[in-house]
Image: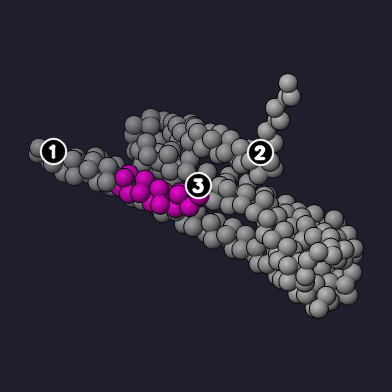
Amino acid sequence: MANAPKPTVTKESSSSTASNLFAMLVIPICIIIGISLYKFVLGDPSNFVDNDPSNHPLPGNYAAMAYKGGMIVPILMGMLLMVFVFSVERFIVISKATGAGSLDAFIKRIQGFLASSNIEGAISECDKQKGSVANVIKSGLKKYREMEVEANMDTDQKCLAIQKDIEEATTLEMPMLEQNLTVIATLVSVGTLTGLLGTVTGMIKAFGGLATSGAPDQAALANGISEALINTATGIATSTVAIIMYNILTSKIDKLTYAIDEAGFSIIQTYASTHK
């Protein structure tokens, strides 16, 4: 009885699994680090009057002021840390996809080789550049070379075959670049909403201080307002950094996609013009 063939694990599926595992580990670790910083750094007794965290912060001690923001502060700190970690991870991935040198210079060199019909030189240039962009272009160039000896297809069919090969290579190489951008995009909204939640709880405490019988509890009022403002500021900071990093990363991915489209168009146009 013949053995059943083993399932093939593609590059895309293995990379996706690794990226998902990375996200599953980073999110709880960042929250734990945020809680630890809140408790042991911001809440250090030396930051407060009489070395007691239940007392007022020392004058000008911003760490203690942040500690008075309440338990939503460490969650926001964890979210801000997530933005930085995922941004660095995406920068590394995109840098590897770009390759060893300048992407613009690489595309110009490829176009120069194509203009002189030096396909082997263009393939060699892809080997030097490396990265996802070079892999996609190299796949199209190899298909170009195959079509030159193909006798059963006309020029239009060959051009379509080259275009399809480039699209398939792009589908394999490029989707992983956007893998964890959804986390950063989610933190844009979640950071603001979590900060708003801290603002609401702080204002509840502030009005609770005003509602006490007799003279208003000024300490409770001050702590409530402080909690509201600190959470607002931290939430806005998290969302602001997340928006900036998301836009920077998406613009870099768009640049890679445009480079592939530009090189792919040059490959197809070169083949069509030289095989009329």
Image point (73%, 67%), residue name: 157
Q: In terms of sequence position, does the residue under pointer 2 or pointer 1 come before the other?
A: 2
Circle 1 packing at 10 Å, graded few (<14), some (14-19), many (20+), is few
Q: Can you tell which quarter of the image residue 127 is in?
A: bottom right
Q: Position of residue 195 (x, y in %)?
A: 36, 48
Image point (68%, 52%), residue name: 173
Circle 3 packing at 10 Å, graded few (<14), some (14-19), many (20+), is some
Task: Let me know if residue 190 is in the magenta part.
Answer: yes
Q: Nearer the viewer, mark 2 or mark 1?
A: 2
The tag on residue 183 is 3
Q: Nearer the viewer, mark 3 or mark 2?
A: 2
The tag on residue 14 is 2
Counting the numbered discs, the total is 3
In three-dimensional space, the C-alpha distance between marks 3 and 2, rounded to whole angstroms, equals: 19 Å
Position of 263 relative to 80 (above/below): below
Q: Can you tell which quarter of the image residue 212 is in?
A: top left
| Secondary structure category for the residue under label 2 | helix
Which of the two residues, 269 or 25, is positioned nearer the viewer here?
269
Q: In terms of sequence position, does the residue under pointer 3 or pointer 2 come before the other?
A: 2
Q: Position of residue 257 (x, y in %)?
A: 65, 63
Position of 144 relative to 225 (above/below): below
Q: Is residue 84 left or right of residue 58?
A: right
Residue on which disc 1 sits: 212
Residue type indicated by callout 1: Thr
Which quadrant is the N terminus positioned in? top right
